[in-house]
Image: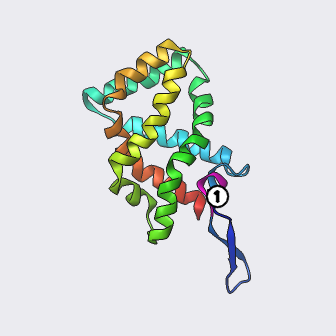
Amino acid sequence: MRADLTTTSCSEDKDIAMAATLEEILLDPGNRPKVLADCQTLIDQEIADKSGVSGAAIKLAYKTATAFAPGYFRSTLEKMLPRMADKLEPYWADFGISGGSDFGDYLSKRGPEVSEDLLSMTDGIAAVSDKPVIVKAYRAVRGTAAKNVEAALPRVGQLVMKYAS
């Protein structure tokens, strides 16, 4: 189900977007390259923030993925963006109905559910990957992935809001 983009005029007679699907927002040809760059930055920030043994495992898995398959991560990110928009759409719609102002906070309050929805997407990608090194690296960190995705949800929400505003 797609929501139509509706507009209203403000005092300056400018049209302002009032509602749109995440697909319309994030995959818009003018936004998509910037969204992908921001997703990469978000991932880099999240990985840099990790510490301890599990953080070292995540950093190693990421380094392995980027070293053994140059370009794979970027192309996977490009394929994931429409799927991510689709997985987040029900939350975005409910967020809009609830009248909230911070999508990151909204996602965080539903952390386990949102993280499992997003991880179902990456699990599916890993299941059909023809890159055994990547799959091995993913499986090495999958056990702690839900916790790490939950930690990233405030930034994910901020990223979405950046383009929805």
Which of the 4 image quadrants contains residue 1?
Answer: bottom right
141 w.r.t. 121: above or below? above
Mark 1 Cα shell of 10 Å, populated few (<14), some (14-19), many (≥20): few
- Give the percent coordinates (x, y) of residue 19: 61, 67
- Give the residue drawn at x 42%, y 16%: 136
Q: Where's residue 147, x and y in %?
A: 31, 39
Assign a secondary structure to mark 1. loop
The image shows residue 139, relative to residue 85, as above or below, that is: above
Residue in front for this viewpoint, 113 or 35: 113
Is 118 situated left or right of 11 in this image? left
**Tally of marks:** 1
Task: Residue 11: give x, y in percent of width and height.
Answer: 68, 87
Q: Nearer the viewer, residue 142 or 159?
A: 142
Verify whether residue 21 appears in magenta: yes
Q: What residue is pinned by disc 1?
A: 2
Segment tinted magenta in the rendering:
20-24
The quarter of the image holding the C terminus is bottom right
Q: Kindly identify the residue that appears in the image at 62 percent across and 24 percent down.
A: 71
Question: Type of residue at label 1?
Answer: Arg
Q: Residue furthest front?
A: 1
Tell me where residue 39 appears, x and y as whole percent: 54, 42
Task: Give yes or no for residue 86 being in the magenta stretch.
Answer: no
> In which image quadrant can residue 164 be found?
bottom right
Left or right of 23, for residue 51: left
Along the horizontal axis of the image, is 122 left or right of 4? left
Specify the principal SS of the magenta part.
Answer: helix
User: Which residue is drawn at the image coordinates 36% and 54% (left, top)?
Assistant: 108
The colour scheme applied to this rendered structure is: rainbow
Q: Residue furthest bottom?
A: 11
* Residue 63 drawn above or below residue 15: above
The residue drawn where x is 41% and y is 49% is 153
